[in-house]
Amino acid sequence: MILGLDIGGANTKVASSDGSLAERIYLPLWLGARLDVELERLAELNPRAVAAVMTGELADCFENKMIGIISIKTAIEEAFQCPSYFWGVNGFDPQDLIELAGANWSVSANYLSRELGECLFVDMGSTTVDLIPIKEKPLASKTDFLRLTNGELLYTGMLRTCVGNILRFGRIKGKRVQISSEIFAITADVHLVLGDLSLEEYICQTPDGSGKDKKSALQRLARCVCADLGEIGEDGALAIAEQVRDRQLRMIIDAIYHQANKHDLTRVVAAGIGENLICRAASYLGLDILPLSRIYGPNLSNIFPAFAVARQLEMDIS
Amino acid sequence: MILGLDIGGANTKVASSDGSLAERIYLPLWLGARLDVELERLAELNPRAVAAVMTGELADCFENKMIGIISIKTAIEEAFQCPSYFWGVNGFDPQDLIELAGANWSVSANYLSRELGECLFVDMGSTTVDLIPIKEKPLASKTDFLRLTNGELLYTGMLRTCVGNILRFGRIKGKRVQISSEIFAITADVHLVLGDLSLEEYICQTPDGSGKDKKSALQRLARCVCADLGEIGEDGALAIAEQVRDRQLRMIIDAIYHQANKHDLTRVVAAGIGENLICRAASYLGLDILPLSRIYGPNLSNIFPAFAVARQLEMDIS
């Protein structure tokens, strides 16, 4: 089998080209997580080839992107005996290694372009949302900076986004209150207490190192307004969660509207751990919706670039 | 001498009642910093009494505020042989220990009320700004939650505030671009590259663990738009810094305007490592300005609650 890898700054995603393997491993590179050890474990699966994409080169343990790219590429080449192929924004094995930077959306979009045709592909992960317009081919810009500029990359995620980054001011019992800029709570807490995220899906660390139970998450949300549950009650903490979720949904609606309008697209293909939120946003806009989990199952939807890069290599080789 | 302590979540500030000692120690409680060891070192100064205030009870290593208060209070009582006194929002040694929560602004305001009379006292630290209206006496609310609600506590600071929390969208070379929600750069980087903060004043850790030189700070700022300096140049990184500083200044102007207007105050007394920024904001509004560094020197202005609590105890005892 061909092993697909998507090495992010916070998570490494793994899939096999036949779809039987789909795994997400919390591996925060900027905290010094041992990518080499994890890759050696994966090498024991004995794939006939490795196909890889990355976004982890942006992690701030690397002085610049090129250093990050070389470091991640070398780690993969050293861990696997079989040939390894790297997908850049223009396809496998680019002339210039910098094309490998942040290319995971590109392989998903290329694969879906062949499989599903014209659509707006929207993939929401732990920290970001990719919005890739696909006409005859994917139309997004080639660097993260340009995608950010063009609204094709949105910084808001299902797990690790700081609550204060999404919501500057909240309302509690009719009072307007500024939200702390400290990472007291994250979107994983928000979606957990609202029932939109299961305990198993809360795969990053909690901001305070305490539990992933609902009570602990509510405590973290209360801390965002410098309070504890004794002061604002569970109602108050839930109110914050609802406002963060609503604001995040609004951000995604605006971003989808902008891209669908600009490229005259009427169908949204949704993927990632935020697939449901994307579907809600697309539904609000009256667009056609195709969740990738309906075709490939939820496990592959959640780590789609890792699957797409393995499939793409398989098609290219055969 | 009497030793004044202000135990924050990120920094512990120390001063003597005669003003000869003024020290700020980076001691991040939520990262497990050893407060007990630091206090034992300070006990060797042999003060005749200790006067303490705190905000560190909100640090997310403590399950709730009361647990934080008891933990910090006990650490102080165990480290020092001499009597120790704790300032709460209603004065020393409150009936209910919860009054010790976030009371450092209160002792500064009480002391200044006696010394300087009617003013708006504004103290900008590493993470927050306190805005305390003083008429016959300090008028601010008694809890951090209520102060946040009333705009008497503002989450924006000179050092540790995430750049993405202040600026959602930046402009680089005429393009609008979203700022990443990751802690790629902080306000210390912003003020350092703009020359408003010296290397010695950059007393917290850098977000990426690399240098506090200007080049490294510019690299961190570029990362906020998913770029490195090769992509946007030093000009682009500086443009981000300027926009963050301008937005932060605007936030402080708005907050001061609101309080001055509400309480009919015409004089701002400025303190903290952000004293200059407060003066700029007050000057923009045409208010009278008194920087505390002009009376007490910059060292005491930067750690004013620690000095004020020591002075307050001295006056109460004598």
Image: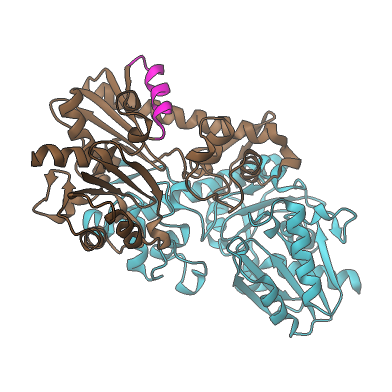
Chain colours: A brown, B cyan
- The answer to whether B295 is drawn above or below residue B136 in the figure is below
Residue nearest the viewer, comparing B126 with B19: B126
Q: Is residue B294 visible?
A: yes
Q: Is residue A280 magenta?
A: yes
Residue nearest the viewer, comparing A94 with B23: A94
Q: Residue at x 72, y 37 (%)?
A: A232
Q: Residue at x 60, y 60 (%)?
A: B30
Is B99 positioned to the left or the right of A56 in the image? right
Q: Is residue A185 magenta?
A: no
User: In which image quadrant can residue A239 be found?
Assistant: top right
Residue nearest the viewer, comparing A193 with B179: A193
User: In which image quadrant can residue A110 be found?
Assistant: top left
**Highlighted magenta segment, given as a residue range:** A273-287
Percent of width and height locating residue A256: 33, 26
List the single residue furthest toward the top: A286
Percent of width and height locating residue B206: 44, 65
User: In which image quadrant can residue A298 be found?
Assistant: top left
